[in-house]
């Protein structure tokens, strides 16, 4: 089998193995967050940061949830990195956003953060703070889910079907899952443009 067919076959296998019960739990949690007037803060780095920015648009416009991500404000993000360091950039941003118990934090990460391995410690510190204030935690992550999966109220772990394509599939399926969420009948409050064109 050539690489293209193998890659698409892996994607098909991931679809079959995704835990739909966790997605349903996520829908219920996000719906409750919206009903309680909570805000949703997306955290991610690299591809996850790009996904976070796109997801903010969709959750605001389609689901009517007030949403933000630090990657949309490069001036503040880079100032915090420069002045305080990369490890604390997200936790300090959440503090500046006055994160509270009615809010949620949504992580897009390949590994989910590992304090012991010093990988994505910025996510670990941010999630520890989110737990402390009682905010809900959601995530779409890969590998074993890392710290995000350990502390989340609902976390989809993208199954590893090939160790050589973990990042590609995880970041791709972050988009698949959040688009599933925003188009879910229990979440969608505004019609999407092309679906409304008859």
Image (cartoon, rainbow, N blue to C red):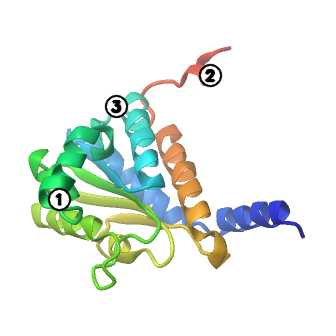
Residue 83 lies left or right of residue 117; in this view the side is left
Q: Which residue is mark 2?
A: 194
The numbered disc on residue 91 is 1
Dots 3, 1 in contact, CB < 8 A? no
Q: Position of residue 107 (x, y in %)?
A: 36, 58
Q: Nearer the viewer, residue 166 or 103?
A: 166
Q: State the residue at coordinates (53%, 43%).
A: 179
Q: Position of residue 33 (x, y in %)?
A: 26, 46
Quadrant (top left, top right, bottom left, bottom right) of the N terminus:
bottom right
Quadrant (top left, top right, bottom left, bottom right) of the C terminus:
top right
The numbered disc on residue 64 is 3
The numbered disc on residue 27 is none
Label 3 neighbour load within 10 Å: few <14, some 14-19, many 20+: some
Dots 1, 2 in contact, CB < 8 A? no
Nearest to viewer (mark 3 / mark 1): 1
* Location of residue 121 (image quadrant): bottom left
Distance of mark 3 from mark 1, alpha carbons?
25 Å
Q: State the residue at coordinates (26%, 70%).
A: 124
Q: Earlier in the sequence, mark 3 or mark 1?
A: 3
User: Furthest residue to the top?
Assistant: 198
Distance of mark 1 from mark 2, alpha carbons?
38 Å
* Location of residue 170 (image quadrant): bottom right
Q: Secondary structure at mark 3?
A: loop
Residue 120 lies left or right of residue 136; in this view the side is right
Q: Position of residue 25 (x, y in %)?
A: 41, 59
Nearest to viewer (mark 1 / mark 2): 1
Q: Secondary structure at mark 1?
A: helix
């Amino acid at each position: 089998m050539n690489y293209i067919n193998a890659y698409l076959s892996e994607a098909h296998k991931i679809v079959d193995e995704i835990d739909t019960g966790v997605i349903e739990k996520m829908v219920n949690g996000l719906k409750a967050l919206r009903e309680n007037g909570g805000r949703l803060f997306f955290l991610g780095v690299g591809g996850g940061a790009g996904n976070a920015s796109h997801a903010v648009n969709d959750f605001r416009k389609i689901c009517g949830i007030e949403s933000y991500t630090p990657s949309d404000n490069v001036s503040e993000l880079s100032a915090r990195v420069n002045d305080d360091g990369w490890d604390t950039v997200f936790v300090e941003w959440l503090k500046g956003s006055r994160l509270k118990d009615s809010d949620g934090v949504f992580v897009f990460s390949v590994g989910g953060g590992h304090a012991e391995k010093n990988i994505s410690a910025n996510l670990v510190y941010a999630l520890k703070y989110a737990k402390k204030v009682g905010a809900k935690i959601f995530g779409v992550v890969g590998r074993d889910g890392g710290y995000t999966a350990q502390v989340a109220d609902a976390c989809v772990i993208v199954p590893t079907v090939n160790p050589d394509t973990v990042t590609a599939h995880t970041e791709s399926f972050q988009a698949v899952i959040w688009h599933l969420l925003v188009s879910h009948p229990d979440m969608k409050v505004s019609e999407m443009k092309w679906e409304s064109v008859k």
